[in-house]
């Protein structure tokens, strides 16, 4: 690991490299230099099974972080190095190091920073504000970004994948899930609204984070947001991605795979707190068509995840890891319950948003 770090443009003597966190995608390590107790760098192995174009991935991140840094400098912000990620190039001036099998990148460790796992109305408001401001800073970026995971949040693609799975019925499960197939199909046209609006030229794609979680922000000791992190999924998308994806997990009163559907509901306190922060953070650029369809986004993501879990169940559990044979079916039912709860609260969501 030390040898890998030394492929980058570092002048310090490396003392130790230790694991950092429990990331589901990339392997992450703290890098210590001689004579200091605080880590100096963060080393990551990029999972190129998921992010297959690492050159595009790192190019996206460099464009985004450079643009944010310029914005912070223009606003005369203090402590800028703690408010945007900084990456270290290799000694031959590349954005990442390829060892023949694996891809590695190195960034500067942001000291005295913290992440939180808990989802409360307070943190949801902070998350909404931070992710909204993140989008706002990137709303005028003049660089072109690519899709690190093509069609990641394209519901039309996901519905087509479900249709193909049903037609194939690889392991004979279609009959037992026909109810969910029918209910999904009843709402398919309505739930493809975003893609239709985009084709009609009414809904733009913007630079979005596409993985909005509370723990994808760094906080200082006082609880203020320093910066948004985990930028691998930053790419062009509808603003619905950042809004709806956060609420799918944060506003769910149950677990994503809750066997007891009575536990699952859509928490309006979380919705209102996150929405308030998000609308404050995006007020400089958000279009009326984007704002008025935020309730649609809150429904879209549990709907989309239902489709994805159900597709995998019908295909014989080939994508998501499962802990027992019916796991994807349990996930399907729990996500559908969350979708139905969000659907029932759509008018309340619209009324709340109309006050801003």
Image: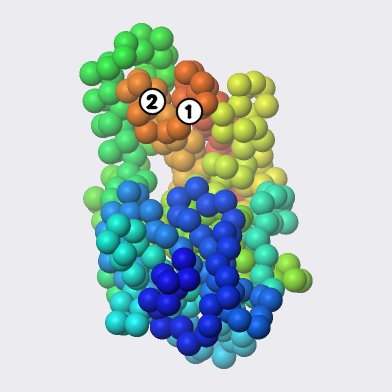
Task: Residue at 46% x, 40% y: name it.
Answer: 301
The reply, left or right, for residue 66 in relation to residue 55 is right
> Residue 88 appears in which quarter of the rendering?
bottom left
User: Closest to the observer: 46 or 235?
Assistant: 46
SS at badge 1: loop
- Expressed as whole percent of the image width and height from the top left, the position of residue 192 reads 33, 39
The residue that appears at 62% across and 42% down in the rendered structure is 251
Q: Percent x, y for residue 338?
A: 56, 31
Residue 169 appears in the picture as rendered: yes
Q: 306 or 7, which lies in front?
A: 7
- Can you give x and y, in whole percent of width and height, for residue 63 in the image? 36, 75
- Relative image position of residue 75 (x, y in whole percent): 54, 87
N-terminal of the pair, mark 1 or mark 2, is: 2
Tags 1 and 2 in contact by the CB under 8 Å rule?
A: yes
Residue corresponding to mark 1:
322
How far, Cα to Cα, is label 1 from label 2? 7 Å
Report which residue position mark 2 lands on: 317
């Amino acid at each position: 690991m030390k040898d890998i770090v030394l492929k980058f443009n570092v002048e310090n003597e490396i003392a130790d490299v230790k694991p950092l966190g429990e990331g589901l995608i990339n392997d992450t390590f703290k890098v210590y230099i001689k004579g200091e107790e605080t880590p100096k760098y963060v080393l990551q192995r990029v999972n190129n099974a998921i992010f297959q174009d690492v050159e595009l991935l790192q190019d996206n991140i460099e464009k985004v972080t450079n643009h944010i840094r310029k914005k912070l400098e223009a606003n005369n912000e203090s402590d800028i190095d703690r408010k945007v990620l900084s990456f270290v190039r290799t000694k031959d001036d590349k954005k990442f190091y390829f060892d023949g099998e694996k891809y590695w990148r190195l960034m500067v460790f942001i000291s005295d920073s913290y992440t939180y796992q808990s989802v409360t109305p307070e943190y949801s408001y902070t998350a909404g504000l931070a992710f909204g401001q993140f989008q706002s800073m990137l709303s005028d970026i003049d660089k072109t970004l690519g899709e690190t995971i093509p069609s990641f949040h394209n519901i039309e693609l996901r519905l087509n994948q479900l249709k193909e799975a049903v037609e194939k019925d690889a392991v004979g499960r279609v009959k037992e899930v026909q109810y969910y197939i029918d209910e999904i199909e009843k709402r398919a046209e309505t739930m493809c609204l975003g893609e239709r609006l985009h084709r009609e030229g009414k809904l733009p794609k913007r630079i979005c984070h596409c993985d909005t979680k509370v723990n994808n922000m760094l906080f200082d000791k006082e609880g203020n947001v320093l910066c948004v992190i985990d930028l691998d999924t930053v790419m062009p998308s509808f603003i619905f991605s950042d809004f709806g994806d956060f609420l799918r997990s944060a506003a769910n009163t149950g677990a994503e795979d809750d066997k007891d559907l009575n536990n699952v509901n859509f928490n309006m306190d979380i919705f209102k707190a996150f929405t308030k922060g998000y609308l404050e953070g995006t007020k400089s650029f958000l279009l009326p068509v984007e704002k008025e369809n935020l309730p649609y986004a809150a429904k879209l993501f549990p709907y989309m995840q239902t489709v994805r879990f159900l597709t995998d169940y019908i295909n014989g559990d080939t994508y998501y890891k499962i802990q027992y044979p019916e796991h994807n079916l349990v996930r399907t039912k729990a996500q559908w319950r969350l979708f139905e709860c969000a659907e029932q609260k759509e008018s309340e969501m619209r009324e709340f948003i109309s006050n801003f």
